[in-house]
Amino acid sequence: MKKYLLIVLFLTVSLPVISGEGMWLPIFLKQLNEADMQSKGMKVSADAIYSVNNSSMKDAVVLFGGGCTGEIISEQGLLLTNHHCGFSQIQSHSSVEKDYLKNGFWAYSADEELACPGLSATFIIRIEDVTQKMLALLPAGIMEPERDLKIKELAATIEKEAVEGTHYTASIKPFYNGNQFYLFVMETFKDVRMVGAPPSSIGKFGGDTDNWMWPRHTGDFSLFRIYAGADNKPAEYSVENKPFKPRHSFPVSVKGVQPGDFTMVYGFPGRTTQYIPSAAVSTTLEVANPARIKIRTERLRIIDAAMRSGDKLRIQYAAKQATIANAWKKWQGESKGLKRMKTIEVKKAEEAAFKEWVADAGRTEYANLITDYESIYKLYRPLLKTNDYINEAAFGVELIRYARAYNKLALLCEANPVDEKAVKDEAARILSGAKGFFRDFDEGTDKQLFVSMMQMYMKNLDASMHPAYLKEQLAKNKNNWTAFANTLYAKSMLSDSIKVRTLLTGFTSSKKKKLLNDPAFMLAKSFATIYLDKIETEFVKLNTRINTLNRIYMAAQMEMKPTHMFYPDANSTLRVAYGNVSGYEPADGVTYDYFTTIEGIMEKEDASIEEFEVPQRLKELYKTKDYGAYGINGTLPVAFVASNHTTGGNSGSPVLNANGELIGTNFDRVWEGTMSDIDFDPDRCRNISLDIRFTLFVIDKYAGCSRLIQEMKIVN
C-alpha cells in the first residue's frame, strides 16, 4: 500500500508540464488539468468533457474499428473519421465497375448507406480506478510472468462483475507499466454503415509523398452512421435497425482558428514509450528501425510498380500499400527526430541522475536497474532483428502469411484423438475468409515479393537462422529464386482460390496429408520453426524481464519525482490532449504557417502523378471561388497544425475549440515530430488536422450531399 500511495501522489499535485505534452485520462482532468486548460483558453469545465452521471463529450467519441477514433456529429448517429481510417471499407465496396476509391461514394438517401460487416464503433460508458482492488489481491513479491497471469485472472473476475446484467463489456488496462489499473466499461455497436467518402484524389491527396508532412492539403475524412435496434441498443445488422440516437453529438463550428487558439484532441492514442531507458532508445535507432525501413522500402517498390500497372491491381493493393507505407515513413522521421533531439544522451543523463538519487536515498533495490537494462538489451538486439525479418520479410510474402493461417487446422488434424467437429469448424472458418484474401491477392506481384524478400532474409541473417526447407527447395531449383517461386506457386494449393475451396470443402482429418505436404504450408512452418526453436524461448524471457524492469523503473521514477505530473503512456484507451494552434520551424531558416488553403492544392496539382491529381469538379469550384459558407477572405481553409500530443490511434479524433465545438479532424503528425512517441519536442511536435470547413465544403458544394449538412448543428 505504501508503494501505491507513492505512485499516485502525483494525483494530488498540479504542476505544469511541457506545453502540449501529455495524453491525459479524462477522469482526472478536473483534478489535474482543468486549471491549466482554462489558463490556455478553455471555456468549458472538465465535467463537460467527462461525466458518468450526465451526457458529456466522451459520449460523442468512439473507438472506430480496431485502431482509429471517430466522432458523432448529428442526432442521427452520423460518424466522422479519417479517409484512411475508412479506407479498407471504401476499398471493400469498390470494384472496377464501382470504383469508390477513385470516384468517391455518397449516400444521397438512407437506403444507399452501405453495410460494413465486421466494422464496429465503441463508446466508453465509464472509467474506474481499480488499482487498490487489484494490488490488494496480488500476492506480495510476485514477479512476471506469474504476476501477469494473476492479473489476468483478477481482471476477468472484476470485469465480469462490472457489467453483469447489462449489454456492456469491460476491460481492465494496466497503466504506468503495470503499476496502476483502470476499468473501462464499453458499449459496442456492430451495425455501422458507410455514408460518404471523397475520391482518393481528395481524401488521399499527396499520397505517400505528403504523408507525415506539412504543409498538407489532404481532405482526409469519411462518413459512417451507427445503427441500433428499436431500443437504441447495439444490434447485429438488420434492415429494421434505426439510426442511433447518441447521448451527445458535437456542434460543428465554422468560425475557424487563429494562432494561439485553445485546441483539444479527444481519442484513443495507440502506443507511446515516454519512460523507456537509453538502451531501449538505442535499440530502436540502431536495430529495429533500420531493418524495418529497409525491408518495407523493397516491399513498397514492388507493390507501387504493380499498382501503377492497372486499375485492378491498384484497387487490390490500395489498403495494403497504405498500411505498409504509413509506418515505413513514420520510422524514418522518428529516427531523424531522435538523433536531432539527442534522446539517447538525454536519457543517459537522466539515468545518471537516477543513480545518484538511488545512492543518496539508500534505495539499494534500484541500484542495478540501469546496468540490468544494458545487459538485457545487448542480448535482445540480435533476437529482435531476426524476429523483425521473419515478420516483415518472410511473412511479408502474402502466400507464406496466408499459409501460416492453416497452422491450427494442421494441429487439430494431428491431435490424438482427433476432434473431427473442431477440424470441420476450423476448415469452415478458414474457407469463410478465403474470399476476402483472394479478392486482393495477385500471384504475379506476390511472386516478385517472394523472390525479393527471401533473398533479403538470407543475405541479412546468419546462416543458423535460414530455414532448412527453404535451402532444400532453393537447391532443387538450382539456386534460381525465380524458378523456385514459379514451382512454389504452381504446386501449392494455397495460391489458388479454386484449389483452396476444393481442399477445405468437406474437410476432415483424412485430408491432412494434402495440407501438411503443401509446399507453401511447409515453407511457412519452416519459418515458424526457426522462431520457435531459436528465438521464442529467449525472446519471451527477455521481454518478460524488460517488462519487469519497466514496471520497477516507472515506480522508481515516480518515487524520485513525487511532485512531477507523469501522464500515462498511450495504450489505446480514451485520452485527452490539449494545446494551441501554432505554426513551427522545422529547420534553420524555415518557418511554417499554422494553416493551408485550397490554393496549395492547385499549386501541387500534377496530372502526370496520381498522388497529385485534382478532380475536375474541385477545379471548377476553385475557379469560380464557389466556397459557399465555408470560405473566408476569398479562399478555402484546408488544414491546420496545433501543439496537441497525438499518436497512431488518434487518427479521426475530434479536434475541439475552447467551447467544445468541432473545428477539425486529427489525421497526422508532422514528420519532424514523429519521435514524440518517445521524446516530445514542444517546438516541433505538431498534430495535423483537417479544417472542418473543408470537410463541410466537400460534402455540401463538391458532392451536393446537403442532407448530411442538415443533420448537423452548425455554429457560426
Image (cartoon, rainbow, N blue to C red):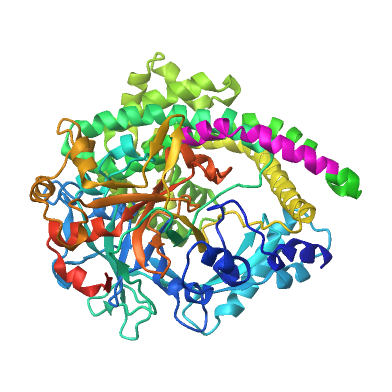
* Range covered by the magenta-colored residues: 332-356
Is 355 magenta? The answer is yes
- The residue positioned 56% from the left and 69% from the top of the image is 34
Residue 518, can we see it? no
- Most extreme residue toward the right, as rendered? 362
Seen from the viewer's position, the closer of residues 224 and 306 is 224
Q: Position of residue 20 (x, y in %)?
A: 53, 53
Is 178 magenta? The answer is no
Seen from the viewer's position, the closer of residues 291 and 16 is 16
Q: Is residue 671 above or below residue 417?
A: above
Q: Main secondary structure of the magenta part?
A: helix
Q: Is residue 484 above or below residue 214?
A: above
- The residue positioned 53% from the left and 73% from the top of the image is 46
Seen from the viewer's position, the closer of residues 348 and 37 is 37
Q: Is residue 652 above or below residue 295?
A: below
Question: In the drawing, does residue 66 fall left or right of residue 173?
Answer: left
Residue 224, can we see it? yes
Q: Is residue 616 above or below residue 588?
A: below
- The residue positioned 79% from the left and 55% from the top of the image is 559
Q: Position of residue 473 (x, y in %)?
A: 43, 22
Q: Position of residue 165 (x, y in %)?
A: 52, 85
Quarter of the image where one finds residue 375: top right
- Most extreme residue toward the top, as rendered? 478
Q: Position of residue 366 (x, y in %)?
A: 83, 46
Quarter of the N terminus within the rendering: bottom right
Quarter of the C terminus within the rendering: bottom left
